[in-house]
Image (cartoon, rainbow, N blue to C red):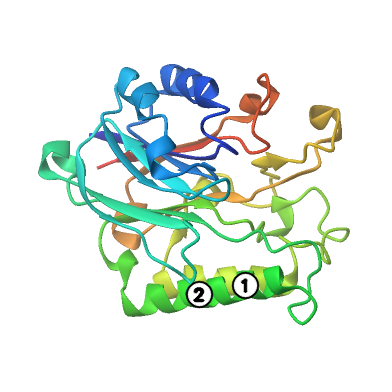
Amino acid sequence: MRLRVATWNINSVRLRSGLVSQFLADHGPDVLCLQETKCQDEQFPSSVFRKAGYEHIAVHGQKGYHGVAVVSRLPFEGREARAFCGKSDARHISITLTREAGDAAGVSIHNFYVPAGGDVPDPALNDKFAHKLAFLDEMRDWCGLDKPGAGRAILVGDLNIAPLESDVWSHKQLLDVVSHTPVECEKLGLVQGEGRWVDAVRALRPEPEKVFTWWSYRNQDWQKSDRGRRLDHVWLSEPLAGHLAGAEIVRHARDWERPSDHVPVIVNLDV
């Protein structure tokens, strides 16, 4: 069975529901994980997804900021929304596919929106950056204590860190820029290592190939400048890593009308 899982920071699901419908029609993932939905649960445009054939929906949102959601053509159960750093700021949701999902039954999917961290990479001067580092520490502890990566699990989302030199347009110029600082990259590496997660995209497209999933709105000609970063990730647990069958960055979505500054990432698994 081929399982297609996609992740996308949509930057307002109500504003861009038409783009999501286009993406679902064109690429047909079985499961789509969204971040930065920016709406309360009751405002989530569920009818749009049900019309597209995605009857199974789990939402964890809040007014105006953050928010995560999972929409699926396959049945799931066990919706869980964890609070990190003692904040109820809608940055995580997880589901588990049920036996009606066939050979994909039992696969759990964790959808994260890691804090961006503000502009100043100093936790003593910037509370947002301090929050980001603390969030990563709690993610590492969660991986070690709860061991989500021990079974058939997938961790996806906007992790807001480009950890490798080839994940940014200029390693040297971005060393002091939030999302690529050494302390962030180190902490994300500890999260990945603690859970023994396998980076699906880099397993198929290893360094030194440059791979980006985000381009700033400030770049008027984003394709020409190509000053991107790989902030959006799909990680596989060791029991699933051997079933990886493909990965795709839907780069052209950045050129759609009124796009998100992130593009979808799709991973295919033969389960």
Amino acid type, label 2? Cys
Can you see residue 28? yes
Cβ–Cβ under 8 Å for marks 2 and 1? yes
Q: Residue at x 26, y 56 (%)?
A: 152
Quarter of the picture holding the C terminus: top left
Residue 250, image x, y percentages: 57, 30
Quarter of the picture holding the N terminus: top left
Q: Residue at x 50, y 74 (%)?
A: 85
Residue ID for mark 2: 85
Q: Residue at x 17, y 38 (%)?
A: 101
Can you see residue 268? no
Q: Residue furthest left?
A: 99
Residue 223, image x, y percentages: 79, 28
Left or right: where does residue 157 sit relative to residue 51? right
Q: Which mark is residue 21?
A: none
Under tag 2, what secondary structure? loop
Under tag 1, what secondary structure? helix
* Quarter of the figure with residue 195: bottom left
Q: Which mark is residue 131?
A: 1
* Quarter of the figure with residue 116: bottom right
N-term-proximal mark, 2 vs 1: 2
Q: Nearer the viewer, residue 209 or 62?
A: 62
Residue 143 against residue 239 in the figure, above or below:
below
* Quarter of the figure with residue 143: bottom left
Left or right: where does residue 182 sit relative to residue 198? right
Residue 178, image x, y percentages: 76, 62
The mark total stands at: 2
Amino acid type, label 1? His
Residue 100, image x, y percentages: 12, 37
